[in-house]
């Protein structure tokens, strides 16, 4: 309880920010469909979000060092609120893509600052409980964000205004806290080659994780509409995916701590291919079947990033962990930037089933690559503990404080 009270302001900001930012992607997809945007234009919005996310991850530590935590957080929050409020003022796919860059910038920047602040306040005694609560708050708010789609009317001022209000409210706990601002941490160097050097399989896995997560979250609403879901059911469809991912964390962690993590990654990807096939075959089997397929898809794909990160850290020394986490996040962003546009083009050309054919092929490549890598070197003798790793900022490695 003391940990919750100590970090209440930061956790409140995380929850409000996640609810606001987590809802804008599916809301944009539904709004774009109402306004006559093509599937490719809707996919472009998702890609633009992750471009902004990458810029924010890279630039936030530098802005933080210039103006401090509170001012940087205010700047990123303002960028996000502007991006949301301007949606219905300039209704054009290219304009919306630019606005989605600002919302992605806001998400990455704000998470970087919150995680930096959290890390500065943690001790060895409180780190485990605090990071556990942080992950629960983040996942819980992500689930609420998807459920909000059921009540937010697409292409309406009120919907974007409400999300902008929540984004601005995230500023209040930080602005009103009486705690002194922590010292500015040194920004991690961005060395993508470090991930490739430590574990090519982990690098490939996080790219596939980015490809999968971004496609489902940003283009999933198009799929849902094409298979007959109503707008108020799209949120439940996306929430089932997030819920599946949350439920999978503990059993996946248990397996990853007891067996060769490469085998766990391969097993997850095989299961993901199966879930893609099931999703394709249940798209006309009714609403509950579609929801169940989304839940299964979340169970099989959501934990892949965390297992891959744990596997990569098994080969890293303690002084490499922060930069390795940043490198893995970079690889995730690479997959996430490309995926929404590619998958939306495939849906436009081949229909809704093309989304899961595309994702299934991505996981098939990962299975083949994983089997090939198992022939190159044995599993490490010493391993880090498995932890659920949020895909939030390049500085997440500093907060998690991995141990062997």
Image (cartoon, rainbow, N blue to C red):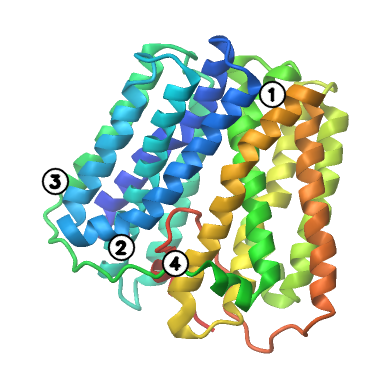
Disc 1 from disc 4: Cα separation? 37 Å
**Relative height, residue 125 to residue 339 (above, below):** below
Q: Quadrant of residue 309?
A: bottom right
Q: Earlier in the sequence, mark 4 or mark 2?
A: 2
Q: Spatial distance from mark 3 to mark 4, Cα to Cα?
A: 33 Å
Quickly name the residue at label 2.
116
Judging by the rendered image, the residue that carries numbered circle 4 is 190
Considering only vertical position in the picture, is 400 above or below 360?
below
Look at the image and tell me in which quarter the N terminus lies. Answer: bottom left
Name the residue tied to disc 3: 176
Q: Name which of mark 3 and mark 2 comes first in the sequence.
A: 2
Is the Cβ of the residue at disc 4 closer than 8 Å to that at disc 2? no
Most foreground residue, 235 or 54: 54
Whether residue 266 is visible to the viewer of this picture, yes or no, is yes
Q: Is residue 385 above or below residue 108?
A: below
What residue is shown at x 40% (from left), y 70% (from top)? Answer: 189
- Mark 3 or 2: in front is 2
Q: Is residue 114 above or below residue 163?
A: below
The Cα–Cα distance between marks 3 and 1, rounded to whole angstroms, is 41 Å
Query: Distance of mark 3 from mark 2, alpha carbons?
Result: 18 Å
């Amino acid at each position: 309880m003391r940990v919750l009270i100590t970090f209440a302001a930061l956790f409140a900001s995380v929850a409000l920010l996640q609810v606001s930012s987590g809802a804008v992607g599916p809301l944009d997809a539904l709004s774009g469909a109402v306004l006559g945007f093509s599937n490719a234009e809707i996919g472009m919005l998702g890609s633009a979000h992750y471009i902004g996310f990458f810029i924010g991850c890279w630039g936030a530590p530098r802005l933080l060092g210039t103006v401090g935590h509170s001012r940087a957080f205010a700047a990123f929050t303002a960028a996000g609120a502007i991006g949301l409020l301007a949606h219905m003022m300039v209704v054009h796919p290219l304009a919306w893509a630019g606005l989605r860059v600002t919302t992605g910038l806001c998400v990455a920047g704000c998470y970087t600052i919150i995680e930096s602040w959290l890390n500065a306040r943690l001790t060895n005694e409180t780190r485990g409980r605090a990071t556990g609560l942080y992950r629960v708050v983040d996942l819980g708010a992500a689930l609420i964000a998807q459920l909000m789609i059921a009540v937010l009317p697409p292409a309406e001022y009120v919907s974007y205004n409400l999300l902008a209000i929540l984004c601005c409210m995230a500023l209040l706990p930080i602005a009103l806290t009486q705690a002194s601002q922590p010292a500015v941490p040194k920004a991690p160097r961005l060395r993508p080659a470090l991930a490739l050097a430590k574990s090519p399989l982990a690098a490939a896995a996080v790219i596939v994780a980015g490809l999968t997560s971004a496609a489902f979250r940003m283009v999933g609403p198009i799929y849902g509409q094409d298979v007959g879901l109503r707008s108020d059911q799209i949120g439940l469809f996306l929430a089932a995916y997030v819920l599946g991912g949350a439920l999978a964390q503990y059993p996946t962690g248990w397996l990853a701590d007891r067996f060769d993590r490469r085998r766990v990654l391969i097993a997850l990807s095989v299961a993901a291919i199966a879930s893609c096939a099931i999703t394709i075959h249940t798209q006309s089997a009714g609403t509950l079947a579609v929801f169940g397929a989304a839940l299964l898809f979340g169970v099989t794909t959501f934990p892949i990033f965390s297992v891959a990160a744990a596997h990569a850290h098994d080969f890293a020394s303690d002084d490499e962990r922060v930069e390795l986490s940043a490198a893995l996040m970079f690889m995730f962003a690479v997959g996430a930037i490309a995926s929404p546009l590619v998958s939306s083009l495939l849906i436009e050309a081949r229909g809704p089933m093309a989304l899961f054919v595309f994702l299934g092929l991505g996981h098939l490549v990962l299975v083949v690559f994983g089997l090939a890598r198992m022939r190159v070197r044995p599993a490490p003798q010493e391993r880090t503990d498995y932890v659920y790793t949020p895909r939030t900022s390049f500085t997440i490695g500093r907060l998690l404080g991995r141990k062997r």
